[in-house]
């Protein structure tokens, strides 16, 4: 697909997020243009995992290479109208959250990414979707408080000294966590006397039959294909 372009939707899911960015980088290296269409939740998750600057750094180049953020779009998501101008040969959604998949299978197009897919389907442009809830996967929680250890303190010195507000005092639970604000300066980990703060904690996410059934309805949409890893997109270029 030399000289061609891909519209790549990124939603608010942490699983397969790093792999999706790596796949985008490989595609750019293959001479294919990519526009990332990032949902509101997607931007928050990218920031929370520390990947936002990496994504915007990769997508520097001539039109249409770049990033479209949902909150910067006007009503109706005019940037998705590029589909009608033949700008893109392929649409990808990876990672695809359960919320976005549910919208797509029910014909709802009230978000940036679901709107993008709707236009692609109507214009017979192939769509590849990587649903994070279809497969067992490992994900990472960027910032975790061990509440059992945290309960040892009567007052949280960490929450009072966090420079970004990722950890803030809370009257009921002593400390409130906002992972998206965390820059991983690790000051909190250094000053917590009970080692209650942990970074990049790995968790296993398992599929549930109810949600698997919803995801498989994607197969009923002509032109839409489910993929099991972001790197599968490379087979289409």
Image: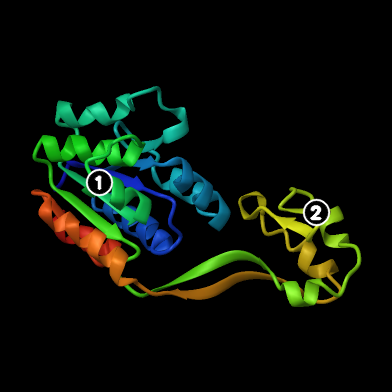
Which element is circle 1 on? helix
Residue 88 visible in the current orientation: no
Task: Give coordinates of residue 221: x percent, y percent.
Answer: 12, 50
Answer few, some or many: residues within 10 Å of disc 2's Cα (few below 14, many 20 plus, some between 14 and 19): few
- Residue 142 screen position, x and y as percent: 59, 63
Residue 177, quarter of picture: bottom right
Residue 43 position, x and y percent, is: 49, 44
Residue at (24%, 53%) from the top-left corner? 30
Q: Is 181 placed left or right of 226 in the picture?
A: right
The mark that comes first in sequence, 1 or 2, is 1
Q: What colour-coding does the image apply?
A: rainbow
Task: State the residue at coordinates (18%, 55%).
Answer: 218
Question: Going by the picture, which residue comes out furthest to the front?
Answer: 210
Residue 161 vertical placement versus 87 (above, below): below
Q: CA distance from mark 1 to mark 2?
A: 38 Å
Q: Residues within 10 Å of mark 1 (few under 14, many from 20)?
A: many
Q: On the image, numbered disc 2 is attached to which residue?
A: 170
Q: Residue furthest right?
A: 154
Residue 175 lies left or right of residue 68; in this view the side is right
Q: Give residue 25's position: percent from left, percent from top.
A: 35, 54
Q: What's the mark number on residue 104?
A: 1
> In the rendered structure, are the residues bearing label 1 and label 2 in contact, judged by CB atoms less than 8 Å apart?
no
Front one among 6 and 3: 6
Residue under the point 78% across and 61% down: 173
Q: Is residue 128 above or below residue 107?
A: below
Residue at image point 25% right, 67% down: 228
């Amino acid at each position: 697909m030399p000289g061609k372009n891909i519209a790549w939707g990124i939603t608010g899911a942490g699983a397969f997020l790093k792999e999706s960015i790596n796949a985008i980088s490989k595609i750019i290296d293959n001479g294919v243009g990519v526009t990332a269409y990032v949902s509101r939740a997607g931007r928050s998750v990218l920031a929370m995992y520390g990947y936002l600057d990496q994504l915007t750094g990769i997508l520097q180049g001539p039109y249409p290479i770049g990033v479209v953020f949902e909150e910067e779009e006007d009503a109706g998501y005019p940037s998705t109208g590029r589909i009608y101008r033949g700008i893109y040969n392929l649409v990808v959604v990876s990672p695809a959250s359960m919320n976005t998949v549910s919208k797509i299978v029910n014909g709802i197009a009230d978000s940036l990414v679901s709107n993008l897919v709707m236009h692609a389907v109507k214009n017979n442009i192939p769509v590849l979707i990587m649903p994070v809830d279809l497969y067992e996967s490992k994900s990472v929680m960027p910032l975790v408080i061990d509440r059992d250890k945290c309960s040892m303190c009567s007052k949280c010195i960490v929450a009072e000294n966090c420079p970004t507000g990722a950890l803030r005092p809370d009257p009921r639970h002593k400390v409130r966590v906002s992972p998206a604000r965390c820059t991983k300066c690790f000051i909190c980990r250094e000053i917590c006397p009970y080692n209650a703060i942990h970074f990049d904690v790995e968790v296993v996410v398992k599929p549930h039959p109810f949600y698997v059934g919803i995801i498989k309805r994607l197969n009923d949409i002509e032109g839409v294909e489910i993929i099991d890893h972001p790197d599968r997109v490379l087979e289409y270029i």
